[in-house]
């Protein structure tokens, strides 16, 4: 990475709180130090409204402040929907605890996700299964389930809300950053570019075997959505059309390199 990661005084996950993203959306952000590589955001997202929606559930190590914040914002007992992108510990860490305190919440996942959740002891009657391309209407929202352009777990499922033009891209666009930051605009483009490539080499190593044109096409499809808000599980949110387009363009340049260059980054990350 061009920017050397700052030394971390306390190399443990810490909770940074909530940030208002507009349109009723807010991020619930923890930060995870990655030894020798930098800092990784671990985000959940909350949509306030008549049917509150929680996107992912964060790290178990940050359970108390995470649940307290959700309870303060919407009331855990009033939470109506939980969209679980995939069953990794940094996304499902507080799932069982939240389901217990939100008895009326329906958990949205897909077929493979349901299988993994069944092995974790989650009751099937709490689930609503969707497939890519299917729409889920929640109040004024129309969440269209989609497969993100790259991912680490095969059940990974994001969405595009055609009403608020919000794109949730799961682990895609995650980046190892040299320091904690509250807003994406605080990250220098070279550091963001290097961070995108470094994290994708760790999180989605199969990209080294993908023809560059295929990934470029996947990113181009997202660009055509004209999103005005891009949410990633591992990066501060991009808000506003210009910032979303800038992130998509930067990712295209960082993640569609020559094959040997990307493979070299994998070795450096390891």
Image (cartoon, helix red, strand yellow):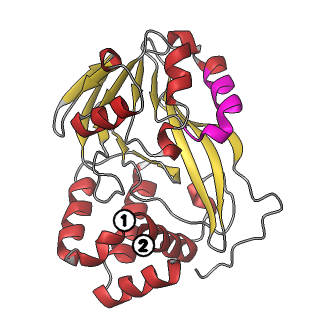
Q: Magenta part mainly helix, strand or loop?
A: helix
Please tell me which residue lies in front, 129 or 257: 129
Identify which residue is drawn at 47% across, 59% down: 174
For disc 2, the marked residue is: 201
Identify which residue is drawn at 51% across, 10% down: 78
Question: Element under label 2?
Answer: helix
Residue 170: image location, x then y, percent: 39, 48
Residue 22: image location, x then y, percent: 52, 34
For disc 1, the marked residue is: 204
Q: For residue 64, what is the image quadrant? A: top right
Q: Which residues are magenta?
A: 58-70
Tell me how far mark 1 sits from mark 2, CA to CA: 6 Å
Identify which residue is drawn at 25% across, 48% down: 147
Disc 1 to disc 2: CB gap under 8 Å: yes
Q: For residue 200, what is the image quadrant? A: bottom left
Q: Is residue 25 left or right of residue 82?
A: right
């Amino acid at each position: 990475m061009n920017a050397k990661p700052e030394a971390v005084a306390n190399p443990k996950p810490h909770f940074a709180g909530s940030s208002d993203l507009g349109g009723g959306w807010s991020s619930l952000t923890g930060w995870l130090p990655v030894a020798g590589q930098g800092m990784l955001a671990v985000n959940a997202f909350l949509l306030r409204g008549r049917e509150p929606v929680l996107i992912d559930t964060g790290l178990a190590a940050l359970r108390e402040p995470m649940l307290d914040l959700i309870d303060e914002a919407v009331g855990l007992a009033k939470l109506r929907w939980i969209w679980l992108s995939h069953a990794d510990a940094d996304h499902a860490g507080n799932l069982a605890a939240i389901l217990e305190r939100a008895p009326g919440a329906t958990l949205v996942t897909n077929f493979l996700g349901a299988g993994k959740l069944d092995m974790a002891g989650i009751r099937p009657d709490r689930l609503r299964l969707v497939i890519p391309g299917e729409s889920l209407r929640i109040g004024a929202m129309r969440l269209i389930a989609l497969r993100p352009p790259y991912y680490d777990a095969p059940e990974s499922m994001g969405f595009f809300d055609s009403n608020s033009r919000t794109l949730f891209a799961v682990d895609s666009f995650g980046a190892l950053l040299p320091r904690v930051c509250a807003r994406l605009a605080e990250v220098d483009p070279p550091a963001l570019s290097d961070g995108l490539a470094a994290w994708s080499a760790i999180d989605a190593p199969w990209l080294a075997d993908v023809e560059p044109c295929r990934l470029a096409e996947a990113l181009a499809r997202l660009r055509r959505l004209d999103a005005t808000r891009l949410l990633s599980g591992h990066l501060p949110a991009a808000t506003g059309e210009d910032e979303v387009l800038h992130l998509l363009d930067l990712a295209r340049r960082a993640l569609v390199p020559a094959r040997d260059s990307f493979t070299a980054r994998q070795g450096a990350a390891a």
